[in-house]
Amino acid sequence: MSKKLEGKVAVITGGSSGIGLAAAQSFASEGAKVFITGRRQNELDAAVKLIGKNAIGVQGDVSNLADLDRLYDQVKSHQARIDVLFANAGGGDFVALGSITEEQFDKTFSINVKGVLFSVQKALPLFQDGGSIILNGSTAGSKGLESFSVYSATKAAVRSFARTWTTDLKARAIRVNVISPGPIDTPIFNSTGASKEEIDQLKTSLALPVPMGRMGRPEEVAKAALFLASADSSFVTGVELFVDGGMAQV
């Protein structure tokens, strides 16, 4: 049986942990050559080792345009083409209205909006017609979550990008779609400095609004990304695919 991404070249930003790493493993297992980015070299090296021989890591920050240029220079020198881009890198903090700082605003928009825009735009000269671009959104872009206004606004912008870029790239048959996860159990919880009890309490509270009664797993989002990356979704473009256990649906 042929693999879904046999012979394809994929780029995944923020691919050293969590959803990005799970997607990279999935894409590589389905035959793709995968380039991943991450800000921390040690994590990136560990991820490449975990993914295997079909992975190349390029250290960098998507909000830094020089880092993006270096990423695509590496892709060009090794493969000279891109078939799939998963613009996954992002982040944000809970900050209540009234306490939002300019620094927090600029940082979040720089990573989640500027980073996504230029990750896509700078990839286009290498992109194959008929390829697939996947943007990582969030249920926060559709929900009014308390103290999450800046992050939510960035993810609403990402959803808008998919609509306009679907139109912009239609002549090249490049599909653009958004994956919007709900609460996902990723290693980020372990980097907060909180105790195990505090982390467990936070995860429980995040799972409460999810009809399925639990947080999602990175590999569940990766399966959706694989669907959008492959020919299985050949007539799917401009959509927002929620992987959220029903959180934003009911």
Image (spheres, rainbow, N blue to C red):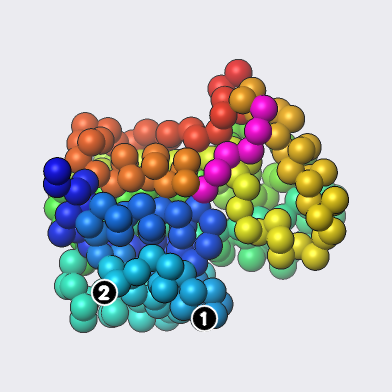
Q: Residue visible at 67% across and 27% down?
A: 213
In the rendered image, the vertical position of residue 206 relative to residue 98, given as above or below: above
Amino acid on which the number 1 mark rests in the picture: Gln
Mark 2 or mark 1, which is nearer the start of the sequence?
1
How packed mark 1 is, by other alpha carbons closer than 10 Å (few <14, some 14-19, many 20 or more), is some
Residue 23 left/right relative to 130 = right
Q: Is residue 25 visible?
A: yes
Residue indicated by mark 2: 75
Taking the view exactly as shown, the residue that stands out farthest to the top is 250
Amino acid on which the number 2 mark rests in the picture: Val
Q: Are marks 1 and 2 in contact (CB under 8 Å)?
A: no
Q: Nearer the viewer, residue 129 or 206?
A: 206
Q: Residue visible at 64% across and 23% down?
A: 211
Instruction: Report the magenta residues as a range.
Output: 213-218
**Res. 145 image quadrant:** top right
Whole-percent x, y for residue 163 in the image: 37, 39
Residue indicated by mark 1: 41
**Res. 99 image quadrant:** bottom right
In the rendered image, the vertical position of residue 230 relative to residue 93, given as above or below: above
| Dot 1: element | helix
| Dot 2: element | helix
Whole-percent x, y for residue 207 in the image: 70, 34
The C terminus - image quarter: top right
Q: Residue visible at 47% across and 46% down?
A: 219
Quote the CA–CA distance across marks 1 and 2.
18 Å
In the rendered image, the vertical position of residue 204 relative to residue 222, given as above or below: above
**Res. 27 image quadrant:** bottom left
How packed mark 2 is, by other alpha carbons closer than 10 Å (few <14, some 14-19, many 20 or more), is many
Chief secondary structure of the magenta span?
A: loop
Residue 19 left/right relative to 247 = left
Q: Is residue 141 visible?
A: no
